[in-house]
Image (cartoon, rainbow, N blue to C red):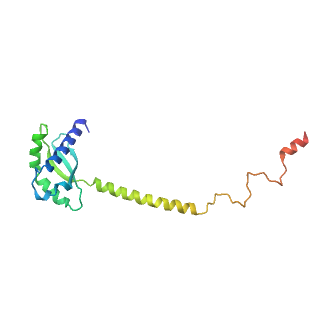
Amino acid sequence: MSERTSKVEQALRREIAELLLRGELRDPRVQPIAAISVTGVKVSPDLSSARVFIDALSGEVDLKRVLAGLNAGAPVLRAALGSRVRLRRTPTLRFEADDSIARGRAVEQVLAELAAQRPAATEAAQDAPDDDAPDDDAPDDDAPDDDAPDDADDDDARA
């Protein structure tokens, strides 16, 4: 993505959010506006169209209804954007639900479950007998055997 495209996306996201907060769109389906967040904008390479991603900050908001209201009012927002953002051609707007926050929450939940299982597995491994651990009663293979002849003493006796 080019730097210009990125700047256009940021400017559109900021201006659309501000237009919504100022009440530029008076559709009752878009209420309460404070519970709606413009999470991102993706413009086409030729800047003729833009996908605007919306998420509801509250579980009480019917996102499908809000999106229907926003898509119905897209021409009004596009006209308002035309006077606020300096572009040769103002892109057409299409509002979509942003599910990245919900997906992020699901990933965090799975990671938390795995983290909760890890200490339980570690404790079980520590409580289980270790077959590789040396027995205190078993003879140590590295220790010298008292019954075996000492080769160093034999060398001294021959010399």
Left or right, 139 with respect to 94, comes to right
Quadrant occupied by the C terminus: top right
| x then y, percent, for residue 139 | 74, 57
| x then y, percent, for residue 7 | 22, 38
Q: Is residue 155 above or below residue 100?
A: above
Q: Which residue corresponds to the image point at 36% horizontal and 56% vertical from the top-left?
A: 107
| x then y, percent, for residue 45 | 20, 40
Q: Is residue 54 above or below residue 45?
A: below
| x then y, percent, for residue 27 | 10, 56
Q: Which residue corresponds to the image point at 9% horizontal and 49% vertical from the top-left?
A: 76
| Residue 3, picture quadrant | top left
| Residue 70, picture quadrant | bottom left
Residue at the extreme right? 158
Q: Is residue 46 above or below residue 51?
A: above
Quadrant occupied by the N terminus: top left
Q: Which residue corresponds to the image point at 21% horizontal and 62% vertical from the top-left?
A: 60
Q: Which residue corresponds to the image point at 18% horizontal and 48% vertical from the top-left?
A: 17
Left or right, 128 with respect to 42, comes to right
For the image, the number of numbered tags is 0
